[in-house]
Amino acid sequence: MHIAYLLTGGNSGNRLEYLSNAEKRVSEECGEVLIASSIYETAAWGVEDQPRFYNQALKIETSLSAEGLLHQILSIEKSLGRLRLLRYGPRTIDLDILFFDNLIIQQTSLTIPHPELHNRRFALQCLVEIAPRFIHPVFNKTVQQLLVACVDTLEVRRLQ
């Protein structure tokens, strides 16, 4: 079995419903969700002139390979209405693999750890809640240390 950390997010439609549906589908199709972070509202990253995002980190236990997990989460995105029209544009749901065990994978279609994780406060804030001491296998720093050093200044706010 493998441990993977995922980030879910979206800013179109009923954001809470999409996150809930994504977590349910991940649990059914990818593996057991061991822990989920709180949901955070964040300013849009990349293309700023769009609605705010809701984001949540999930820790899962899976029997899938990293490539198999990627295939499955892309299928879940598509089934939940994800359209890839504009890079960093609005979306119903986005599922990203942040970490997969302690592996470093660099392929055309898959890079693990997520290559921009250390630059995205919204991802680190969600992740630090459930895995503050997890060590990034490339930077050899904990998630907490990466959050402290993150230069991204976009607002991240936990929902009550």
Image: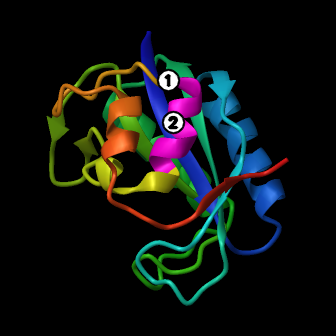
Nearest the camera: 120 or 98? Answer: 120
Q: CA distance from mark 2 to mark 1?
A: 6 Å
Helix, strand or loop at disc 1? loop
Residue designated by label 1: 131
Q: Position of residue 146 (x, y in %)?
A: 33, 39
Does residue 3 sit above or below 110 in this rendering? above
Residue occupying the point 23% across, 24% down: 103
Asked whether the residues under the numbered discs 2 and 1 touch, taking CB atoms below 8 Å apart as contact, a structural biologist would say yes
Does residue 13 sit above or below 101 in this rendering? below
Q: Mostly what secondary structure, the magenta segment?
A: helix
Helix, strand or loop at disc 2? helix
Hey, what amino acid is under mark 1?
Ala
81 in magenta: no
Determine crowd level at label 1: few under 14, some 14-19, many 20+ residues with C-alpha closer than 10 A: some
Residue designated by label 2: 127
Q: Would you say residue 30 is visible in this rendering?
A: no
Q: Position of residue 5 (x, y in %)?
A: 47, 31
Quadrant including the N terminus: top left
Q: Position of residue 80 (x, y in %)?
A: 69, 61
Which residue ends up furthest to the bottom in the rendered image? Answer: 49
Residue occupying the point 15% across, 46% down: 107
Magenta region, residue range: 123-131
Hey, what amino acid is under mark 2?
Leu
Residue occupying the point 68% across, 29% down: 27
Looking at the image, residue 12 sits to the left or right of residue 57; the answer is right
Q: Position of residue 121 (x, y in %)?
A: 45, 53
Q: Would you say residue 81 is visible in this rendering?
A: yes
